[in-house]
Amino acid sequence: MSSLHDFATWRPLLRLVHAEHADTLAAPGGHVAGRISPGGWSVPLSRRPRQRGRASLVSDNQEQYDAVGLIVEALREEGGDGVSFVVEASSAAGGVRLHLIGTGSSTEPGIATAHPGTLLLADGALPEPVRRLPDPVPDAAPAPSADVTLLRRTLRERLPDAVGASEEEIAAAEARLGLPLPPELRALYQVVRGRYEDRADHQEPYDAIGCELLPLGEVYVADAASRQVPWRYAATKAVGTWPEDAVQGLVGSPGWIVFGDNGGGDRIAVDLTPGPDGHLGQVIIISHEETVGVELVADSLTDMVVHRHLDGRPVRRTERPPLVAHVNRFSLPGIEAAAHPGLEVLDLGVWEKEPLGLAPVFGLPRLRSLTACPGTLADPREIARLTHLEYLELPPAEWRALLDAGAVPAGLLAADIASHRQRDNPLRTVALANEILARYGRPRITDITVLEGTAS
């Protein structure tokens, strides 16, 4: 038995949990839950307030860190990426029953929750925004500001001791990328190949170029797979490119060649698949905080490096119906206001009026995602008439109504159960998830281990 499944590994954490939640665990059906992974954790423990006049320190909550650390170490030993847990009282005095829930092959773990994450209902299925490829722009051309000779000369003046890449190194990079470097990017690397060991003490490529330059061997194509967007986040987004756009609103593109970083984790790339109002070879920034879309930095690499243009250019937006519609007490006043032929995502949020009927969106050809808060739907069974749905997120009661009526949409690719983190027992959510998975012939969540012992 691995140390992860040894009650002794969990006892220090369980002692803290039992002490803080004694009343909850003593109540009928009482439970507490959390999730721990090597990269972070969410455990049902409060933290001691910091002392006045200084920042919080690990030592302020050392017992908690040490207890969680034992589990993190056990995960690392067995190569696990995370474990969810549910604690209930057992019949023994001071005893607890610990349920350890592993990650199933048909789920994509959620963030900081013990409940199952996204249920993957078809092998290899991807959300529509991730599947979307760039629209062709046959008339795209380099910007008038693009000037390979001026760019090369300016870089050599600013970086006189820089070591450039050889033709062999450039050819190797192109073979790895599967496409030729555009002329300006090729000129950049012919002057400075970006290796740290090449830098002279008095030279700073960031100042000379306008970004942190990646070594030529680390240049990569920022296609959709490189962004690694969780299913739930991608499914509830929509991508669109309009005539006034300089860049295409994509998750990723086979024409985005990343060559730099802004120093804060956002990637700088040359764009070979521009929008209708863009230029071939323009410079874009890919935010690490966003899941869809990029921003224009400059019309050309020459514009960015030589002329120090780093702020793109203003865009005049045309008013259009939203592709993602939020119906709630603060946004759209009803489903009728959200319905139009281009609607892709419908989100029913906090709602204080009568529950809503879905009739206004029946037959919409592009409606692929629906999310709904508890009590927003007048009749969940109407979901069966949304024949183009790929993604569905519902609370447990609404899922129960669909399952009992045999009305779960056949074409779903992924689904989520919107469970309340504290109120709903993750074990019940797992049981419901397994019913949904069974409808699609998918492997169930079976990696559940039960341990019993005393917390003290």
Image: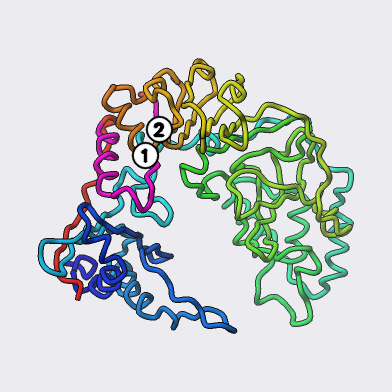
What stretch of residues is rendered in magenta?
A: 410-438
Whether residue 219 is situated above or below residue 133 in the rendered picture: below
Of 296 and 369, which appears nearest the observer?
369
Please tell me in which quadrant of the rendered image residue 194 appears: bottom right
Instruction: Examine the structure image and report whether residue 425 is included in the region drawn in magenta.
Output: yes
Question: Residue visible at 36% across and 40% down?
Answer: 119
Please tell me in which quadrant of the rendered image residue 198 appears: bottom right
Residue 323: percent from left, percent from top: 62, 30
Please tell me in which quadrant of the rendered image residue 151 appears: bottom right
Residue 379: percent from left, percent from top: 39, 23
Q: CA distance from mark 2 to mark 1?
A: 6 Å
Question: Disc 1 residue type?
Answer: Leu
Q: Quadrant of the C terminus?
A: bottom left
Which residue matches tag 1?
120
126 displayed left or right of 122: right
Question: Residue visible at 70% across and 62% down?
Answer: 262
Question: Disc 2 residue type?
Answer: Leu
Disc 2 vs disc 1: Cβ atoms closer than 8 Å? yes
64 displayed left or right of 206: left
Whether residue 257 is situated above or below residue 451 in the rendered picture: above
- In primary-sequence order, the first of circles 2 and 1 is 1
Residue that lies at the very extreme toward the left in this rendered image: 92
Question: Residue visible at 56% across and 32% down?
Answer: 327
Which residue matches tag 2?
413
150 displayed left or right of 450: right
Residue 203: percent from left, percent from top: 78, 77
Of 155 and 89, which appears nearest the observer?
89
Residue 52: percent from left, percent from top: 56, 82
Instruction: Examine the structure image and report whether residue 200 is included in the region drawn in magenta.
Output: no
Q: Quadrant of the N terminus?
A: bottom left
